Amino acid sequence: MTVALAVTLLLSVVIGLSLGLLGGGGSILTVPILTYVAGLQPREAIAASLFVVGATSAFGAVSHARKGRVQWRTGLIFGAAGMVGAFGGGLLGGRIPGTILMIAFALMMVATSLAMIRGRKNRAAEAHEGELPVGKVVLEGLVVGLVTGLVGAGGGFLVVPALALLGGLSMPVAVGTSLVVIAMKSFAGLGGYLTSVSLDWALVGGVTAAAILGSLVGTRLAGRIPEAALRKGFGVFVLVMGVFVLVQELPGPAGPAVGIAAAALAVAAAVCRFAVPKCPLRREPAPAGAAG
């Protein structure tokens, strides 16, 4: 076993931990790991990530379902619509240059991370486990599925916000439901990619097995961490990974410039958040029962 393969398998455990704990983040980790550690080309890495994340999500969804943290009707409708979009995205993604796919991947990560960190405005809406309107679920599923199939991302880190921020589901239910959606969309997107990409199935199988092992730990921890901390921590993690990919993929001096700008903004945000009383990054505590 080579050092690169050993490191890839070790990091793959973290993929499963992320999926089991957060209901997302799997493709955010899988694509960079397979690209920068295992040495796959971007299109192959994206296709492989769809299988790894799909299989691991399906495994994790079973554990969440046993604990009543899956909203089946919403998840299946969202997932079915997502499969249509994901297959089309996979067909298209297999014919787009890898660098463009990776930059699109990173930009989507950054945009969604900011939504997760900010959260919903404090309004009267409450977290609930009720069903979402079918039309809204189908539309969101198609859009998120297209992104998932196209860049191998946008699984949990788009589904969880869609369910938690827009749909009003509590974070534990959004996490469990998102795993069902991710599994359905990932396999559909993989089908689209396999029309133009071939995979090293031995490597993919090893990464998948390690990720499933990590998901066992993540699923046990889910629901034991405060909802607001879980959402914001997830958002910060996605933001850091998005900036990292941009720094790696943007041509010439653009990459380092993005890294420097991101570091400066992070310092400014920290100073504002903790040292400026009226900083817009501060948010008044939500009323009792309000969604976080």
Image: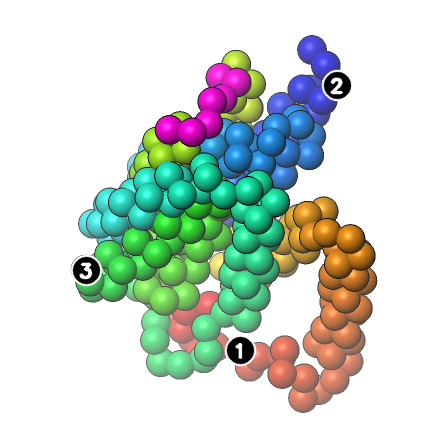
Labelled disc at residue 285: 1
Labelled disc at residue 134: 3
Callout 2, which amino acid? Val
Residue 245 shows in this picture: yes
Q: Disc 2 versus disc 1: distance between alpha carbons?
A: 48 Å
Q: State if disc 2 and disc 3 touch (CB < 8 Å).
A: no
Horizontal relation, residue 74 to residue 220: left or right: left
Relative to 254, say whether 14 is above or below. Answer: above
Q: Disc 3 versus disc 2: distance between alpha carbons?
A: 48 Å
Category of crowding for the residue at label 2, using alpha-carbon neighbours closer than 10 angstroms: few (below 14), some (14–19), many (at least 20): few
Between 15 and 243, the one nearer to me in the picture: 243
The residue segment tinted magenta is: 195-201
Q: Disc 3 versus disc 1: distance between alpha carbons?
A: 32 Å
Circle 3: element type: helix
**Identity of the residue drawn at 47% across and 22% down:** 198
Category of crowding for the residue at label 3, using alpha-carbon neighbours closer than 10 angstroms: few (below 14), some (14–19), many (at least 20): few
Q: Which percent across, then down, holds residue 88?
A: 33, 44
Q: Which percent across, then down, holds residue 45?
A: 55, 32
Q: Which percent across, then down, holds residue 265?
A: 74, 70
Between 95 and 74, the one nearer to me in the picture: 95
Give the mark, 3 or 1, whose residue is nearer the N terminus: 3
Give the mark, 3 or 2, whose residue is nearer the N terminus: 2
Callout 3, which amino acid? Val
Viewport quadrant of the N terminus:
top right
Mark 2 = which residue?
Answer: 3
Question: What secondary structure predominates along the stretch shown in magenta?
Answer: loop
Between disc 3 and disc 1, the foreground one is 3
Horizontal relation, residue 96 to residue 179: left or right: right
Callout 1, which amino acid? Pro
Classify residue 140 by image quadrant: bottom left
Horizontal relation, residue 38 to residue 200: left or right: right
